[in-house]
Amino acid sequence: MPDKIRLGFVGANVNSTWANQSHFPAVMSSPDVEMTAVCTTRPESAEEARQRFGAKLAFHDFHTMVQSDEIDAVAVVVRVPSHYEPTKAAIEAGKHVLTEWPLGRTTAEAVELTALANARRVRTAVGLQSRVSPALMYVKELLEEGYVGEVLTCTVNTFRDGPLERASDRTWQRDADLGAHTLTIATGHVIDALRFVAGDFARASCMVSTQVPQWYQPDTQEFVDTPSPDNVRVSGQLRSGAAAAVHVGAVPWAGSGYRMEIYGREGTLVVTGSVSSQRGEMLRVQGAQRSQELADLVLPQRFNFVPDDFPRGDPFNIGQLYTLFAESIRTGESRQPTFETAVGLHHFIDTLKQASDTGQEQPVR
């Protein structure tokens, strides 16, 4: 296998917002993967991407791209409703595949893709990059080593940009059935970070609501109904016995960002950031042991899997994910979040929705 994993990138449009912020600079700076092939929906945009990223090949049909012998793996970085088809095609072609979160529009899609990947014996990764954040990996280690002793209670709040208006080409997210909204994406990332560091929930109650039921489209000068949720409140108990509470809200102005607090018999850990758990900023970690004063903790260098000069911000955790994905392809050992990780989170989000719909606490399996 070449020194670098040869990547075919589905969703390589140079104007793509999230890919521009994260995946493109991560891949271009990675010592582990290279942008060998790009794929968009039109020949013109595919050629533009090929030239922009110095890729060898350009495609406007992912079915054709995944058949190429010149790529080892495929990245699927498109809108959530479009994850299923290129991911399935890549697996069926025997390519290893990294797909953004949510893995599928529905849990059923995620389960099907995971079973297919296991049957074809390809390596997988999913964009739950909180699990490769150096800060959160350190917090997980500290908890396992007993830094706070028995965990008694933990809480996570995340308040970030939520629109009152959106241009018509972006209001597709108002359709909850398409699987891209505050419950699936923002809450999915935030609550997965808590599950990663402190363990799974044993039972949970939940209230999902839509506080902004209409968005204004400035280009059409119309208000459109927006039934997708924008606030999620979860209360429950972890399998460890710890009490847990999570509130994720999409708010119009001056969101306070991310804050995780974990309280134990022997101490406290607090993690904060200006955006969210999965974004590439280096989260601040503070701790206290038998003290009322928090102090900053220095993150160990061993949790950085990318070079020291790797771009900070959103590319960082994505770069960490690509490094571990490449490692799994070379060694067969997975340290990255995989499709199985995604399926577990899909099922948990289904449980939260059921708890909200019924108004009853639900066991978490």
Image: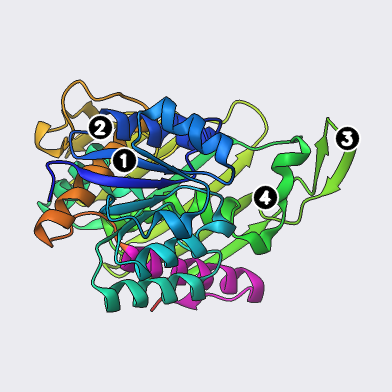
Residue 85 higher or lower than 260, as above or below: below
In this rendering, would 98 be left or right of 62? left
Q: Earlier in the sequence, mark 3 or mark 4?
A: 4
- Of residues 110 and 161, which is closer to you in this image? 110
Q: Is mark 4 on a helix, strand or loop?
A: helix
Give the residue displayed 72% in from the left and 51% down from the top. 174
Q: Quadrant of residue 260?
A: top left
- Other-residue count near label 4 (Cα within 10 Å), few / some / many at <14 / 14–19 / ≥20: some
Q: Which amino acid does label 1 sit on?
A: Thr
Q: Is residue 352 magenta?
A: yes
Quote the CA–CA distance across marks 2 and 1: 41 Å
- Residue for badge 2: 286
Q: Does the magenta stretch include residue 201?
A: no
Q: Earlier in the sequence, mark 2 or mark 4?
A: 4
Q: Give the range drawn in magenta.
A: 339-363
Query: Is any atom of residue 85 visible in this view?
Result: yes
Q: Quadrant of residue 166?
A: top right
Q: Which mark is in front, 3 or 2?
A: 3
Contact (CB < 8 A) between labels 2 and 4? no
Prevailing secondary structure class for the magenta stretch in the rendered image: helix
Give the position of the C terminus as an image quadrant: bottom left
The percent coordinates of residue 21 (x first, y second) are 45, 30
Q: What residue type is labelled 4?
A: Gln
Contact (CB < 8 A) between labels 3 and 4? no
Q: Which of marks 1 and 4 is nearer the N terminus?
A: 1
Q: What residue type is labelled 2?
A: Gln
Q: Is mark 2 on a helix, strand or loop?
A: strand
Q: Which mark is in front, 1 or 4?
A: 1
- Residue for badge 4: 173
- Residue for badge 1: 36
Residue 344 higher or lower than 210, as above or below: below
Q: What residue type is labelled 3?
A: Thr
